[in-house]
Image (spheres, helix red, strand yellow):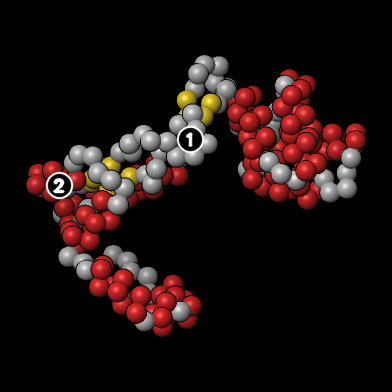
Amino acid sequence: MAYNKVWSETIKWIDSHQNKNDFIVLATADHDTGALNLPGGWLPPSLVNVTNSIEYLADWLEEESEGVTGDDLTSLIEGVLADKLALNVTAIDPEHMSLLTEAVTSGSGIAGNLTEIRNVESGLNWGTGGHSSVDVSLYLYPQTDKKLVESVQGLHPNVWLGQWIEKYLGLDLASVKAKLDSDASLRNETMRQEILAGPVISD
């Protein structure tokens, strides 16, 4: 959603200029992640009342459950599932609950078990726990130069985009890398902070 908003605002800003071809925007994804699929029964409304990320809740549970056992631990876990992840605790598979309780007790694998329970209840399914091998799209705006458009079409390895930008802008990044490698002073924290505090370039 945030990506779509940024893209929309960028296009509006470019379109507000008389010569749109003074600009070029390339947009793509780093990787396709997770291989999301919806095998049926997807329940997006079940996600509306989720209040925290899985990562946050996993860390919170690990901290708050220290020294807690028995019914008190069960109540703590069920409270997180019901109040923070908007789940109907009585509908959760007992095996999933057991695995989550074990994870909380051991302090290991909490996030994975919370994710599994949340996915099952919302009908989400993932083909992989990491990056998938699916190609990602590359978008170009607003160029009408046919030769330029053709230069970015087709299938490319993930390092190609940076190489294309280097060539298009006439940069020599190899010499920059060599300079950084040979002069440690160029990599120090003071310079990094000076760069971050530099002037903002605006239209």
Spot occupied by residue 166 in the image (x, y as percentages of width and height): 22, 61
Spot occupied by residue 73 in the image (x, y as percentages of width and height): 85, 38
Circle 1: residue type = Gly
Res 140 quadrant in image: top left
If the image is split into quadrants, where does the C terminus sit? bottom left
Spot occupied by residue 137 in the image (x, y as percentages of width and height): 30, 38
Q: Is residue 120 left or right of residue 80?
A: left
If the image is split into quadrants, where does the N terminus sit? top left
**Residue at left 55%, top 16%?**
41
Structural crowding at the residue carrying mark 1, measured as other residues with C-alpha within 10 Å and reported as few (<14), some (14–19) or many (≥20): some
* Closer mark to the observer between disc 2 and disc 1: 1
Spot occupied by residue 158 in the image (x, y as percentages of width and height): 31, 47
Residue 59 in sight in this render: yes
Structural crowding at the residue carrying mark 2, measured as other residues with C-alpha within 10 Å and reported as few (<14), some (14–19) or many (≥20): few
Q: Is residue 88 left or right of residue 38?
A: right
Classify mark 1: helix, strand or loop: loop
Mark 2, residue position: 151
174 w.r.t. 187: above or below: above
Task: Please name whichever residue, 146 or 201, is drawn nearer the observer in this view of the structure.
Answer: 146
Q: Is residue 7 left or right of residue 121?
A: left
Task: Please name whichever residue, 84 or 99, is drawn nearer the observer in this view of the structure.
Answer: 99
**Residue at left 21%, top 67%?**
171
Q: Is residue 126 left or right of residue 99?
A: left
Mark 1, residue position: 34
Instruction: Give how far apart the Cα atoms at labels 2 and 1 are.
Output: 30 Å
